[in-house]
Amino acid sequence: MNWITNYVRPRINSIFSRRETPENLWQKCDECGSMLFHRELSDNLNVCTNCGHHMAISPRARFGALFDGGVFAEVAVPEPVADPLHFRDQKKYPDRMKAAQKATGEKEAMLVATGEMGRTPIVAAAQDFSFMGGSMGMYVGNAIIAAAQQAVKLKRPLILFSAAGGARMQEGILSLMQMPRTTVAVQMLKEAGLPYIVVLTHPTTGGVTASYAMLGDVHIAEPGALICFAGPRVIEQTIRETLPDGFQRAEYLLDHGMLDRVTPRMQLRDELIAITRMLLGLAPPVKGDLPAPDKTEAAAADPGKAPGPADKPAGDAGENTPK
Amino acid sequence: MTHYLDFEKPLAEIEGKAEELRALARGNAEMDVSDAARALDAKAAALLDDLYKSLTPWRKCQVARHPERPHCRDYIEALFTEFTPLAGDRNFADDHAVMGGLARFDDRPVVVIGHEKGSDTKSRIERNFGMARPEGYRKAIRLMQLADRFNLPVVTLVDTPGAYPGKGAEERGQSEAIARSTETCLRIGVPLVSVIVGEGGSGGAVAFATANRVAMLEHAVYSVITPEGCASILWKDAEKMREAAEAMRLTAQELKKLDVIDAIIPEPRGGAHRDPGAAIAAVGKSIAAMLKDLDGKSRAQLVKDRRAKFLDMGSKGLAA
């Protein structure tokens, strides 16, 4: 209405917003090659708007979309011994860790959080493929155990998003021992009568598939995800024949009875809400984007960074009206 | 004929010479070569001691894979009585890479399960070189559940390069079968003891070795991936297997330090393949000791003991 709103404020805004402009405004789809505008892509949860190809998504971005109002509280994971084997290949393991931490801004390859999803209190854990291939070492094992313990303590279901190249070789036998360790975590959930839902994302392979990722009450995969024990290259070298199209992809596994469902990422949240609420015997869900359960502006504005107030006492079964 | 490993070449020469001398003497009655032959024998024995005193991790892998090393079948035949193989997973097939069934150990009825690699070309192919398919793990699950129902201890013998990486195996749920087998190991309320007698190859080994007590033969190896596989991923060169074997800490001695295994079973001089009888007897002694150790524990205690063992594992690292 006056020159301050019409002229000064836009100028000030433009100065500030310019600084936030990401370096890469466009990202190329790995599948169809389309150039995708970063905002459109992140609004679509890193699923190509042209061909529907599911690209990797960070655990934080995933949780931001999963939890009501993007608010969640991180669950602390007990710190394992660093570099237990004093492992060194072409690089030292601690150096590789530092590089991965710098590149991702995360401490390790798994994020555990509590919060509400469609007003359903849950514990969620997500593996970060960008952190050393999501590989399972002592930390990931501890994270899954912590997630299960938290779920049992709060009497909530656990939803786990898997993504890993397999075991973390730099932790040698101790990475292999995460197979029984994480299996104990799954047993804790089952004995407590709590749902354990696994969402298998691209890629889920090796010892990860052969332990907690295949022991869910319900297995849902994202379209096109590679899910296997031995990778296709290893198999081709062993049997010396070309593998069929789509071999070991989510749809192939669905056909072979290893999965319950293949669900596109954009529909995943509603489906997870529906399934967990039915398993828990709760009333039908409220659809749509729900605000954070507790209106704390600071936390809602910066969902990933600040631990949110989501870890409040769970609403009772009848509480399903949006606030 | 003895099969010599590459690092045993000098030994092959000495033993070959001693053998030649003896052959010569057999053809010629007047010749007395016993002194010379005995001297060569002593030299060979000293060299063998020397070679096996401090085997590098890669050499241990070679010894663990030695074709003449006693396998599951040999252990079962020698240590168990009334072995009654039970076959099939009740779903698809019987996997010959896994053998198992009812048997008596020191007269006590048990269920014994193990990977069998085979001992000649024909049996190796039949046994798929000890690489199990999902049916093998599902058979093991079935047998463990049987043991659980009838309160019989379970003894597992681990000797596998890994689970079979094949098309059908993947289609029929190799991962799920391994995961369930590990899960069953953790669930059963009966004593479960395991011996890694040769190669403990990755998930294929864990599926049987998630036990209350785990022992390992002195020169056996147990690892998350083969040294060749690790080298090709981390060094981008499968030929760097020596370095990889070193870095991975896959020997019984290192794994004992990490508390991943409970006991090391000594092997006869020159490895189990040089005196299978002695190696088998030592394994028998170890199984008896492990079972005795678990005597009197309730079903709940056995499950708790197993879970606690694995939950605590690795909490100290090598530094401890």
Image (spheres, rainbow, N blue to C red):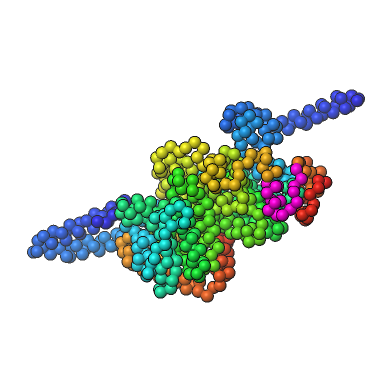
- Res B168 visible: yes
The quadrant of the picture occupied by the N terminus of chain A is top right
B176 and B52: which one is in front? B176
Residue B195 to residue A134: above or below? below
Residue A122 to residue B304: above or below? above
- Which residue corresponds to the image point at 71% horizontal and 58% vertical from the top-left? A154
- Which residue corresponds to the image point at 46% horizontal and 40% vertical from the top-left? A233
B56 and A256: which one is in front? A256
In this view, the residue farthest toward the left is B30
Residue B292's spot in the image, x, y percent? 47, 73
Count the labels in the image. 0
- Which residue corresponds to the image point at 43% horizontal and 49% vertical from the top-left? B164
Residue B202's spot in the image, x, y percent? 47, 53
In this view, the residue farthest toward the right is A2
Residue bounds of the magenta highlight? A272-287
Q: Is residue A286 magenta?
A: yes
- Which residue corresponds to the image point at 51% horizontal and 66% vertical from the top-left? B148
Q: Quadrant of residue B198?
A: bottom left
Residue A91's spot in the image, x, y percent? 51, 44
